[in-house]
Image (tube, helix red, strand yellow):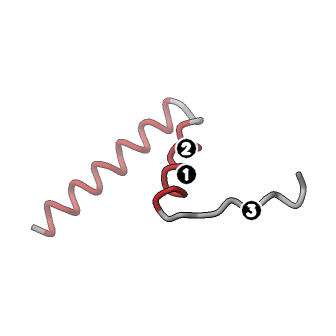
Amino acid sequence: MRRNNQLSFQTLIQQEKDRIMKDPKEIDKIYDRLDKKFEVIKQPSPNA
């Protein structure tokens, strides 16, 4: 069971890498999804 989970996780990571390589703006979408998942509160940039 663990082996299958590891393989599916590696496949997911590879798919995300491929998407980022095709369109670099995809990484922003991925970070936004992670922020929502982990309930990260965006802090205003001090240089903004």
Determine the residue located farthest toward the right in the rendered image.
47
Q: Residue at x 21, y 57 (%)?
A: 7
Name the residue tied to disc 1.
Answer: 31
* Between marks 2 and 1 in the image, the one whose residue lies nearer the viewer: 1
Distance from the alpha carbon under mark 2 to that under mark 1? 6 Å
Secondary element at image label 2:
helix
Q: Which residue type carries mark 2?
A: Ile
Residue 1: give x, y in percent of width and height.
9, 67
The residue lying toward the viewer, choosing from 34 and 17, is: 34
Q: Is residue 24 above or below residue 37?
A: above
The residue lying toward the viewer, choosing from 19 and 48, is: 48
Snapshot quadrant of residue 3: bottom left
* Between marks 2 and 3 in the image, the one whose residue lies nearer the viewer: 3
Secondary element at image label 3:
loop
For mark 3, does the 10 Å Cα neighbourhood hold few (<14), some (14 to 19), or many (20 or more) residues?
A: few
Residue 43, numbered circle: 3
Residue 16: give x, y in percent of width and height.
41, 44
Q: Residue at x 59, y 35 (%)?
A: 25
Q: Is residue 14 above or below residue 4?
A: above
Name the residue tied to disc 2.
Answer: 27
* Between marks 3 and 1 in the image, the one whose residue lies nearer the viewer: 3
Distance from the alpha carbon under mark 2 to that under mark 3? 19 Å
Q: Residue at x 51, y 56 (%)?
A: 36
The mark nearer the N terminus, 2 or 3, is 2
Q: Residue at x 36, y 51 (%)?
A: 13
Q: Are marks 3 and 1 in contact (CB under 8 Å)?
A: no
Residue 18: give x, y in percent of width and height.
41, 38
